């Protein structure tokens, strides 16, 4: 029975891809079905340990999948994902014979995509162990894309990997006291001479410090290429002196400099902390020179990023923490005086200091940021958070100052922060005044979250009566959200004497606003009439027809489906 079902399904899928009007989805379904079948057979064989007629059963399925893939990729040549799926299948199911042809066809059609050239070259190198074929692919790719950084970087990596592999082979032969004459590897290849040629060609075409650093990062992965690493590093400093990235890289290198031979490694925790502190001082010395040589915002940004990164590093040394804070603050104030820091870094540093409970420093940084970026709501938000945590007694004055500089439509986060602070401080009258002012000052959709929070606060602070008073005061102050009305309905339900007339009032008000698109509101109203002790089930029919008239578009079908499920007892 299972075999018949498999044959029937396969025939059905086969018929679909033989039709006159072909659909890509039919080919994909066919392939997916056959691959799942192949995987099931493999799992069954593994579980049972049965390998009889493996080639007779699996090979035809694999060939059939390849045939379907081939037809689909020819029909829809531009679908790169289809080609990649074909390649992934062939690699997994050991159909490597076809992969060379597939890659050739793919690159002939999509020669404008460097990533595909890299994929093909990696396959030649890693799966076929053919460095020469990989090299030829990279050279062809560079003719199509002579200024592509990724191609040069991967070609450079490939040549270094090839050189390392040959060096290891030679070492193994030498250890075994075997004749290495048959290897016939030129000394230039073993020392990475080909990689050096690629590097020189690359930097003559792509003149970028970022690209230069990426090549250096690749070279640093190979221990035998120390001379090449030094040359790349020296070229980086010579060719890109005015680029902040060069100085940033040079400074950070001071952190990773290894101890010189003969030097004793620090043994105690304090000695290790002192060593880290000395390295960081050397980094900062390079940065100090950098900001004098390249006094730009980008350079100061690199310096500050480094200081903040080190400040966030965990350490058990109180002295090291103190030094890191001093260095960070000293660098910040220098940059602030020159007005060469972006707003983001003021916010990041203030927030970082705030998390470290350094309230005074955090407030100083935020205050400096606000003076430079008065029209930034995010900057004011950071300052006000610092003020709240430092328990300032002039919060109202600071909030009013923020509102004076900012446009009303930008101030929603500040109003919510102020109201939350006032509520946490237990100032009921002041909190209500803040909510009323916010609703008056904010317009349109910005006022909606404030109304919801105002209603919630009223219920928490004054109970149902207070919440109902707030609801009545706002019921004509549009716009609203559905949640505004649902909250009031929920508050009513939480009362011991839940009044049905009040629920009807809230539902009717909600439907007046959202009755044209919210099918759930209508269904909840109908359920309320059915389930409430004082409900009127006879009203449900009228509610149903009202809903059918008011709802629009897809909401009508959704309502009908939900109503039918409810009547059938499934909702």
Image (cartoon, rainbow, N blue to C red):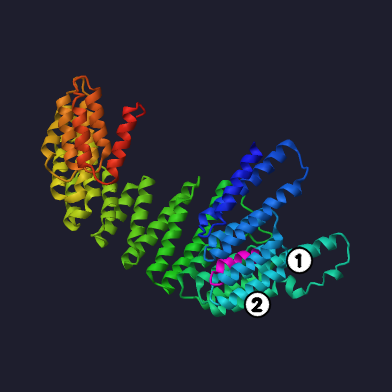
Q: Is residue 438 visible?
A: yes
* Crowd band around label 2 with a 10 angstrom C-alpha radius: few (<14), some (14–19), many (20+): few
SS type, badge 2: helix
On screen, residue 199 versus residue 281, left or right, reads: right
Q: Is residue 394 visible?
A: no
Above or below, 180 against 327 in this view is below
Q: Quadrant of the C terminus?
A: top left
On screen, residue 329 versus residue 469, left or right, reads: right
Give the dominant element type of the magenta stretch: helix, strand or loop: helix
Measured Cα–Cα span from mark 1 to mark 2: 18 Å
Q: Is residue 64 magenta?
A: no
Mark with earlier residue (1, 2)? 1
On screen, residue 523 versus residue 30, left or right, reads: left
Label pair 1/2, CB-CB below 8 angstroms: no
Residue 43 place in picture, x, y as percent: 67, 41
Please report the bounds of the magenta region as a residue range.
Answer: 111-122
Relative to the observer, which residue lies in front, 428 or 474?
Answer: 474
Residue bearing the label numbered 2: 197
Residue 185 place in picture, x, y as percent: 79, 72
Above or below, 497 against 544 in this view is above
Above or below, 83 against 522 in this view is below
For image coordinates 53% across by 70% down, the residue present is: 211
Residue 169 place in picture, x, y as percent: 79, 63
Residue bearing the label numbered 1: 166
């Amino acid at each position: 029975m299972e075999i018949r079902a498999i044959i029937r399904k396969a025939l059905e899928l086969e018929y679909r891809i033989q039709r006159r009007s072909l659909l890509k989805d039919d080919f994909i379904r066919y392939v997916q079905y056959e691959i799942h079948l192949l995987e099931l057979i493999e799992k069954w064989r593994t579980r049972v340990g049965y390998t009889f007629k493996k080639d007779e059963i699996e090979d035809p399925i694999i060939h059939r999948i390849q045939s379907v893939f081939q037809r689909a990729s020819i029909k829809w040549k531009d679908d790169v994902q289809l080609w990649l799926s074909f390649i992934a299948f062939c690699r997994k199911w050991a159909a490597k014979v076809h992969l060379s042809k597939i890659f050739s066809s793919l690159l002939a059609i999509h020669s404008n995509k460097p990533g595909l050239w890299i994929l093909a070259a990696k396959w030649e190198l890693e799966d076929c162990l053919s460095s020469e074929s990989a090299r030829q692919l990279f050279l062809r790719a560079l003719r199509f894309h002579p200024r592509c950084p990724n191609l040069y970087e991967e070609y450079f990596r490939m040549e270094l990997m090839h050189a390392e592999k040959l060096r290891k082979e030679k070492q193994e032969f030498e250890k075994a006291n075997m004749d290495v004459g048959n290897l016939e590897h030129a000394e230039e290849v073993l020392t990475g001479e080909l990689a050096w040629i690629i590097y020189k060609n690359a930097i003559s075409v792509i003149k970028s410090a970022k690209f230069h650093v990426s090549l250096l990062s690749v070279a640093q992965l190979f221990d035998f290429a120390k001379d090449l690493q030094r040359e790349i590093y020296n070229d980086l400093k010579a060719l890109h002196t005015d680029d902040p990235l060069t100085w940033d890289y040079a400074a950070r290198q001071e952190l990773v400099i290894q101890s010189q031979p003969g030097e004793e490694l620090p043994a105690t925790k304090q000695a290790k902390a002192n060593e880290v502190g000395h390295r960081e001082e050397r980094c900062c010395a390079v940065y100090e020179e950098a900001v004098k040589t390249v006094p730009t915002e980008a350079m100061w940004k690199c310096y500050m990023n480094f200081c903040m990164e080190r400040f966030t590093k965990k350490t058990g040394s109180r002295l090291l923490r103190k030094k890191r804070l001093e260095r960070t603050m000293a660098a910040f104030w220098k940059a602030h005086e020159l007005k060469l820091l972006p707003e983001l870094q003021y916010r990041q540093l203030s927030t970082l200091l705030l998390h470290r409970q350094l309230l005074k420093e955090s407030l100083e940084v935020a205050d400096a940021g606000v003076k430079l970026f008065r029209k930034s709501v995010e900057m004011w938000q950071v300052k006000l958070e610092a003020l709240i945590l430092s328990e300032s007694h002039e919060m109202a004055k600071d909030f009013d100052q923020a509102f004076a500089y900012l446009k009303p439509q930008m101030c929603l986060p500040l109003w919510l922060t102020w109201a939350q602070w006032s509520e946490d401080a237990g100032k009921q009258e002041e909190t209500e005044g803040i909510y009323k002012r916010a609703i008056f000052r904010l317009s349109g959709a910005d006022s909606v979250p404030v109304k919801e929070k105002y209603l919630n606060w009223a219920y928490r602070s004054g109970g149902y009566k207070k919440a109902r008073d707030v609801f009545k005061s706002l019921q004509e102050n549009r716009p609203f959200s559905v949640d505004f009305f649902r909250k009031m309905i929920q508050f009513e339900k939480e009362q011991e004497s839940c009044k049905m007339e009040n629920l009807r009032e809230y539902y009717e008000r909600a439907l007046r606003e959202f009755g044209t698109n919210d099918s759930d509101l209508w269904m909840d109203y109908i359920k309320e009439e059915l389930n409430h002790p004082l409900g009127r089930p006879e009203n449900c029919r009228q509610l149903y027809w009202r809903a059918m008239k008011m709802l629009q578009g897809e909401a009508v079908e959704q309502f009908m489906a939900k109503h039918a499920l409810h009547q059938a007892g499934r909702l």
